[in-house]
Amino acid sequence: MATVSNRTKGIICIVLSAFFFSGMSSFINLSGDVPVLQKIFFRNLVALFIAGFALAKNKESFAPHKGCIGYHLLRSGAGFVGVIGNFYATTKMASTADAAILNKMSPFFTLIFSAIFLKEKVKPKQAIAIAVAFLGAMLVIKPTMDNPQLVPSIAGFIGGVCAGAAYTCVRHLGNKGENGHFTVFFFSLFSCIASAPYLLFRFSPMTGFQWFCLLMVGVCAAGGQFTITAAYTFAPSREISVYDYSNVIFTAISGYFFLGHQIPDLWSFVGYFVICSMAVWMFLYNKKEHQLKNSK
């Protein structure tokens, strides 16, 4: 029997994570008119228990590494705002695929924030890719005052920006040797505490189906987080990151079949093409740069 390479395992895991996150988007919509912060609480409550179980099972510490607490707070604060933006866009936009592609702007903003705060150099081709991807995002957002979805589109874009900031903190925490399971646990705990006051004073009663949907939001979110962590354990980002954009395809398919035959408009499709093209270009560029560096 042929041995499966780590790169293949990484690709399988990252495609699985994209599938899980597209499932999360579908269940967010299927849960109906439940307030966004209520959805976020239950999404993170499930992830909190799963991450806590993983830490306990592996006998890992429930405390951060020395000097990491500040970065955990930054990561969690940015991540929490990012999730609010993404959930609001997913709930309010006519196409969940539009919300998904705006969230996929996060890798480009990770480059920007890494350059600003981690002093990692952004090369000219990377800067061009960021600028063109931003133009692609504008095609999806369609920033005109007569666009009825302008506010949720901007929220989705801000969600991508904040996710990029959060991933920059995750990258820095990883460089400092922080445990990935604890990072997920801390973020989930932070988000539950931050959203709990809303539930105490403004809890919206839910049907049995809505409870089920929010449970599945949490299960899918946890599945996505752990499979994407496994993916980058098997293979480096330069070899597999581009496959994460399969999330947009999964989300578009589920939006059509399960959420009322959602079909993005022409400008959104053009925006998808532009953003995904820049992601592929960055993927190929980073891989070539790594090969040149190793050949010296």
Image: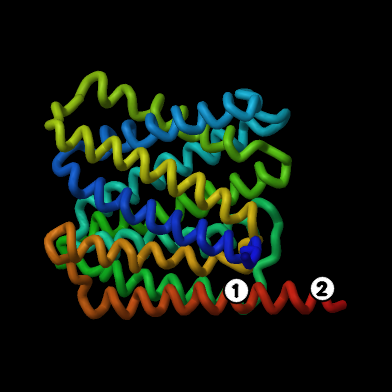
Asked whether residue 160 appears in the rendered view, the answer is: yes
Left or right placement of residue 155 versus residue 124 in this view: left
State the residue at coordinates (34%, 43%): 84
Q: Are marks 1 and 2 in contact (CB under 8 Å)?
A: no
Left or right placement of residue 163 versus residue 247 in this view: right
- Quadrant where the image shows the N terminus: bottom right
Q: Secondary structure at mark 1?
A: helix
- Quadrant where the image shows the C terminus: bottom right
As displayed, is residue 133 above or below residue 120? below
Q: Which residue, given by chain and number where applicable, does mark 2 sit on?
A: 294
**Which quadrant would residue 34 be assigned to in this image?**
top left
Pointer 2 local density, CA inside 10 Å: few below 14, some 14–19, many at least 20 = few
> Earlier along the polypeptide chain: callout 1 or callout 2?
1
**Which quadrant would residue 260 be assigned to in this image?**
bottom left
State the residue at coordinates (64%, 52%): 233
- Outermost residue toward the top? 200
As displayed, is residue 257 above or below residue 190? below
State the residue at coordinates (65%, 51%): 117
What type is the residue that disc 2 sits on? Asn
Picture coordinates of residue 144, whole percent (x, y): 22, 69
Q: Which residue, given by chain and number where applicable, does mark 1 sit on?
A: 126
What type is the residue that disc 1 sits on? Gln
**Which quadrant would residue 152 be assigned to in this image?**
bottom left
As displayed, is residue 183 above or below residue 66? below
Pointer 1 local density, CA inside 10 Å: few below 14, some 14–19, many at least 20 = some
Picture coordinates of residue 168, whole percent (x, y): 59, 51
- Outermost residue toward the right? 296
Picture coordinates of residue 99, whole percent (x, y): 31, 59
Please state which of residues 186 and 4 is positioned toward the viewer in this rendering: 4
- Label 1 vs label 2, nearer the camera: 2
State the residue at coordinates (60%, 73%): 126
